[in-house]
Image (cartoon, grey):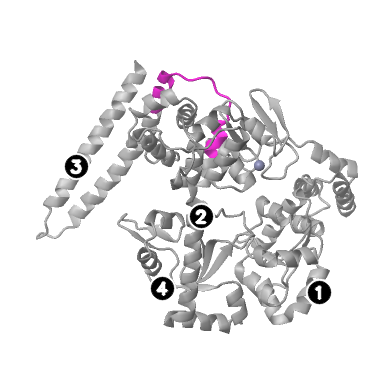
Amino acid sequence: MDTVEQIKQVASIVEIASQYTSLKKRGRRFIGLCPFHSEKTPSFTVDDERQLYHCFGCGAGGDIFTLVMEKEDLSFPEAVRYLAHKYNIELPKQKKLSPKYQSQKEKLFKISQKALAFYKKNLLNTTEGKKALQYLKKRGVSENTINELKIGYSLNSWDSLLKYFQQIKTDIKELEKSGLVMRRNDKQGFYDRFRGRIIFPIFDVSGKTVAFGGRTLFNDKPKYMNSPDTPIYTKGQILYGLNFSKESIRNSKQMILVEGYTDFLSLYQGGITNVAASLGTSLTENQASLASRFTKSIAIAYDSDDAGKKAACRAVSICFAQGIRTQVILFPKGQDPDNYITEQGPEKFKSLVNQSPSGLKFLIQETSRGKNLDNPEEKAQVAHRIMENIRDIPDSIVLSEYIKKISEYLSLNEGELRSLIKKKTTSPGKSQTNWFFNAEKRLLQIIFNNGDIAIKLFENIQEEDYKGLKSEPIFQIFSEFFKKEQSDSHSKIYELKEKIDPSLFRALTEILVEEAHSPSFQEAKDCLCALRQVVLPRLIKKLQNELKSRENRLRKMAKGEDRNAIIKEINLIIKEINEKQKALCEISQQNNQ
Ligand SMILES: [Zn+2]
């Protein structure tokens, strides 16, 4: 038995999770405050029997290995060693632990590092890059800033980066995982994601390159584009520029929050160095929690348009829940942080920060804007909405003071306002359960929790049974798994976490910790049948569309052209449709028996 198996047999996820939070038994499961996000009512769930965890608040989930990896910041083999040591399991000597997975993240870090160097070289050493450089200089970006922020350029070509990585013999699969290249529509090869763009590398707090953002030089759309989520980068978890500005934020005891890298750049270069960007329309809970490690005060500097104001309201509310004090900087109409500091200079910017209203005041003003507070219904609506945004403030004294201020502003009774908070039902967070069809969900539960049934079932499952379903990537990985027998030394959960989309992974761990009765092979087969009834009609529809387009083509063909090839294709499609319809018929007959 290999080390991973031995660990699975003796380790207890409840014991390990209890190192990070205190757990209480609730039915078959244990619950506690989530160690991955800050919360007041517990939504972190640990399933002892299945050895899984899932947070219904932030969606964190996985098994004992991913838990240790994330909490202790370890790679997979390091986590195995950590757990082996803890449970006195002897490690195999000299043999390296699953080298295939050992360096997944490290490989991606290396690729990012090389891509960064490649983009930098493009900017400085190519004719096209010189133009990009001119553009940057025209926009007032200094050489110093370009060097410090490690700004680069991606050539306006479909494959310059791809070719570079091929030259240095990088595994194309790894490169695809990095998000720097994309698979072509015809599946014949790959192409560069960033073309003709000024490249802003995105760093984590420690300064490691984890992703890239690009601004087009050729009026391409979108104007700004970022890397997709990868095993080393999750949108909404990083604050751009924090690696440069964290000391300044600590010293000034305040962070200026902007939206994108151009705002960051202008402020940073203008000497306002306590700045970070949320990269996206609004601040996320994860970002606020990250920020709170450095300061408890954030001045929000979003655009002055309606979208910017809305995003600022959301950010204020998220900061409240993290115990962060906020201010919202109000720019003159039509202005943003970038052009304000460029036109007015850093001193004016600083005084604007000092004059800016508190988050609470801004929230009250925005919520009551355009509302008639003499009208009782409208006033109630405003009160509800404001209370909604402040109810998660963790410090009861702060909350109390805020309620006092709101009551003064709206001339409402404090007790009345307080009662709005008490009525709150504990919401378990955004549920992902309705991601899957019922049969699909149940089938996933059975496959994960009953190895024997799963092995038998996968003898019957074909690719067509799950094609087009949300869970297709999971089934794919699993069928490979059973084909090559489970001989690898790793955890299934860990492998899935590395390979599938994070939101799909969250949905998966959520349904896996659900209470469910124990299944039979017949139930699994029934689920599969039900799924086929979902998938087959979809496939038939798709084939019918293909048929239509072929028929249209045939109609439009000139006389001399070769019609035979198309007719052959049409016949094949018809045959396929008939087969699928027959299969569907058989299933519904079986069900009626
Ligand atoms: Zn959580």
| Image location of residue 319, percent across then percent down | 74, 53
Mark 1 is on which residue type?
Ser
Query: Is residue 196 positioned above or below 382 on the image?
Result: below
User: Toward the viewer: 505 or 344?
Assistant: 505
Q: Residues within 10 Å of mark 1 (few under 14, many from 20)?
A: few
Cα distance between the residues tagged 3 and 2: 47 Å
Q: Amino acid at mark 2?
A: Glu
Please say whether residue 356 is visible from this viewpoint.
yes
Residue at 56% across / 39% down in the picture?
A: 65
The image quadrant where one finds ligand 1 is top right
Numbered tag placed on residue 156 in the rendering: 4
Q: Position of residue 275 (x, y in %)?
A: 70, 67
The CA span between labels 4 and 3 is 41 Å
Whether residue 335 can be seen here: no
Q: Which mark is residue 377?
A: none
| Mark 4 residue type | Asn
Give the alpha-carbon distance from disc 3 to disc 1, as whole Å. Answer: 73 Å
| Foreground of the two, 527 or 238 | 238
Residue beneath disc 3 = 572
Residue 147 position within the rendered picture, expressed as x and y whole percent measured from the top left = 58, 76
What distance separates the C-alpha of mark 2 from that of mark 4?
29 Å
Observer-side mark, 2 or 4, equals 2
Q: Nearer the viewer, mark 4 or mark 3?
A: 4
Tell me: residue 230, above or below residue 135. above
- By secondary structure, the bulk of the magenta-drawn segment is best described as helix
